[in-house]
Image: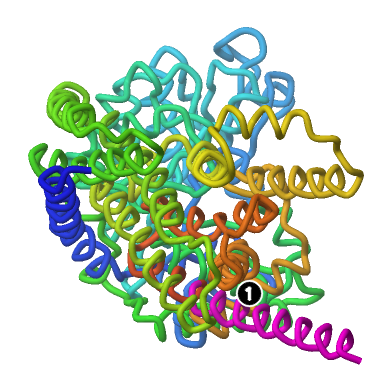
Amino acid sequence: MEKWLKTLLVLLLAVSIVSSGAALLPRLRAESAHNMVDGALPYTDLKNMAQERQTSIEEVARLFKEEAGVNAVLYKEESLKDLADDGRLFLANRQEMALSGWRDNLPFNGGGTYIVTADADVMERVRRHLTEKLGEKKVALLPQRNGFYALAVDVRPSIGEGIGVGFDRENVVNLENMGFHSVFMLKDWPDVTQRGIRFAIEDLALTGKNISAVLFEKKQVLGYPKYLPVLAEEMNRYRLALGQVEFYNQRGFNQLAVLLGKRVIRMHSVTDEEMQTIEPQELVDRLTLAVRERNMRILFLKFLPAPDSDRRFNINVGYMKNVVTRLETAGLRFEAGSGAIPRPFEPIHQSRILLFLIGLGPLAGGVLLLERLGVKRASILAGITAMGALGLALAFFAFPLLTRKVTALASVIVFPTLSIIYLVPRKGLKPWHAVLRMSQMTAFSLAGALMVSGVLADISFMLKLQQFSGVKLAYLFPVLLVACAFFMLYGEGTPGERLKKLMDQPVLVKYLLLAAVLAVVGLVYLTRTGNEAAVGVSTLELKFRALLDRLLGVRPRTKEFLIGHPLMLLLLYLGYRDHRCMPLLILGSIGQVSMVNTFAHIHTPFIISFIRSINGFILGIAAGLVLTAVLKLRRLLEKRWQSG
């Protein structure tokens, strides 16, 4: 390669690295400031425990607050059935109403729902909600009879009993006065209207003052798709944050989040089924991991089961206290009162010029890769560089989001591939020279990780409203590219001749077995990658991961420190002498590829990804040195055996 062209490519790499750092700084500031956490108790469980202990909800909540350090309550909107189960009203059909004395002039012939209560406040609350949500034509107030109030609703009882009628405002106010924050979950209802949405949000905003987030119960957000702008307008009016429950995908969520200016708080919740079998320590590990590594800022702290009330209280206070203590030790804050509510990320604005400068890095790296693979003419490489830069500029102008994703994908493919091809030697290195070469390889690969982190430094990716695209490709393609590159670069004759010779070779059973092993490893490698892995994780592995988390603070990737890094160090020690080293090369490449891909998880704080990579590198080097020592010992013993 011409010296001027190589100098230009190195300069483009330097510009990209500096630009990536500049783009990363706002994200680092946002992640550092995003340190408030709500530990939210289930209001229903508080109410049940208060009833069991024959005390008030406020007293039970106070005990949890003082002993465990929790600071929020999650309220699910009460339905007509909930109020009936509490004995605050009675639900009846037409025949039951007739038997109760309301025989004359009952409205809504057929299968309507009838509501009876002796509490005037409850009746007024129910009437207002049903009238605003369903419309006046579907609601009729009956004459008062023997001190009871009655309401007729023109919906079938099976539907009517599930309609939400707001929250117990008195209890919400009492708990907020004790310092608790409020998380509200709204129910849907049939035939949602603009009027109903405006009323529901206004009623919610008047119920609580220290509201951390608003959630929606169904598989779609309220009013989707027709009335999302109305919902966003009302939530913006009261500056309400949208709660994002991890692993619970709702239709219309991303659209609503954008309409709210990405004012989103992430929340982690364990399913009711899992809560029946999960161990307290496993639950603590899972919740703390969600906050530290996935930017969860509301934890829904459901109650673990126990045979009696006292034991249930002690078990749940114990696990919640452990969660709070571990997170506070890590620098997170559980605070009470109106001034300490978790806040959404502050907006991050990246200029397209800055993003373009970052994109020059994978472009320059790609040109260097082409040169290494045999494209030697400077005019061709210079033309690719010029056309690539022009195309990149136009792409960032016309399709900025898609171009950011493509730039990130190019970074995770190019840099680990380039570092391995350049730095794996033909002749073996001494162990400590191999460690130094491994450090150089890792540093060069991490340049690609920095570019990924910079070009995707945006709230949309931090909240998983947008995600890095091409996860499987990013893990598989670099490994295949490295294997093909070494096959082309090393060996006798032209690549075509080497390929023909390979195809003409007889296949031994041992090589078939080796190929099968590699195929299985590759299948597991691919299915265990991405946000939704297809292969489950065993209980033993989960315990091993939790142990690493507790020992190291941040758990390294298993495929890095147990497979990729040790085998790559062993390859550097042995050298790529011939194609018999190909399996070692393929498995060793996994470490570098996985390490760079770690940084594509933008919802994980950058510092966590960095510590994870460093931990994996250190443990991998240690394991690799053990492998080289074992190999040296084996060679020594063989030599002594052969010499008699």
Q: Is residue 539 above or below residue 644?
A: above
**Residue lying farthest top?**
109
Q: Nearer the viewer, residue 7 or 438?
A: 7
Q: Judge whether residue 118 can be spotted in this image.
A: no
Q: Residue at x 21, y 40 (%)?
A: 359
Q: Kindly identify which residue carries mark 1.
A: 546
* Amino acid at pointer 1: Ala
Q: Residue at x 36, y 38 (%)?
A: 466
The picture places residue 18, in percent across and down from the top left corner, at 14, 58
The picture places residue 236, in percent across and down from the top left corner, at 19, 39
Q: Residue at x 61, y 61 (%)?
A: 559
Q: Is residue 319 above or below residue 106?
A: below
Residue 211 within the segment the image draws in magenta:
no
The picture places residue 227, in percent across and down from the top left corner, at 32, 20
Position of 394 compared to 423: left or right? left
Q: Judge whether residue 258 can be spotted in this image.
A: yes
User: SS at mark 1?
Assistant: helix
Residue 634 within the segment the image draws in magenta:
yes
Q: Is residue 147 above or below residue 172?
A: above
Position of 96 compared to 190: left or right? right
